[in-house]
Image: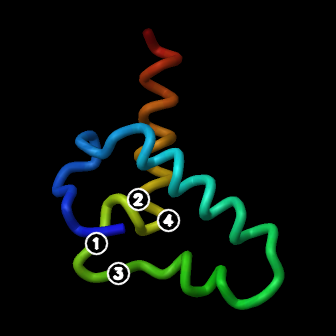
Amino acid sequence: MSRKYDIGDRIPNEVLAARLDELSNTLTKRGEDWQREFTVRIPAELDRDADLVMAEAAKRLRAMGAG
């Protein structure tokens, strides 16, 4: 992932979905990968940092339900 996105809503759904898959896979494996995958970077990487990816995905799901 990268710092190429400055605004969360500019991240394509496919990129968010791929990152959510990565995070999900990491949680189901044994080992210490989860520590690396769930770090928060400074400056933030909107398409990588787990908290930001999950928050943006939740925002988009809510918006779909409101329509």
Tell me if mark 3 has few (under 14), some (14-19) or many (20+) residues whose alpha carbon lies within 10 angstroms of its own: few
Q: Pinpoint residue 12: horizontal percent, then vertical percent.
A: 34, 40
Q: Is 9 placed left or right of 31 in the picture?
A: left
Mark number, residue 41: 3
Q: Pinpoint residue 66: horizontal percent, then vertical percent.
A: 46, 14
Q: Pinpoint residue 38: horizontal percent, then vertical percent.
A: 55, 76
First along the sequence among labels 1 and 4: 1
Q: Is residue 38 above or below residue 46?
A: below
State the quadrant of the C terminus: top left
Q: Pinpoint residue 26: horizontal percent, then vertical percent.
A: 69, 71
The residue at 41%/78% (across/down) is 40
Q: Are marks 1 and 2 in contact (CB under 8 Å)?
A: yes
First along the sequence among labels 2 and 3: 3
What is the C-alpha distance between the residues marked 2 and 3? Answer: 11 Å
Give the residue type at disc 2. Answer: Leu
Residue 43 lies in quadrant: bottom left
What is the C-alpha distance between the residues marked 1 and 4? Answer: 10 Å
Instruction: Looking at this view, name the residue that lies furthest to the bottom.
Output: 32
Mark number, residue 61: none
Mark number, residue 52: 2
What is the C-alpha distance between the residues marked 1 and 2? Answer: 8 Å
What is the C-alpha distance between the residues marked 4 and 2? Answer: 6 Å
Give the residue type at disc 4. Answer: Ala
Q: Are marks 1 and 3 in contact (CB under 8 Å)?
A: yes
Q: Which residue is mark 1?
A: 44
The residue at 30%/45% (across/down) is 11
Give the residue type at disc 3. Answer: Arg
First along the sequence among labels 1 and 2: 1
Q: Is 46 placed left or right of 40 in the picture?
A: left
Q: Which residue is mark 4?
A: 50
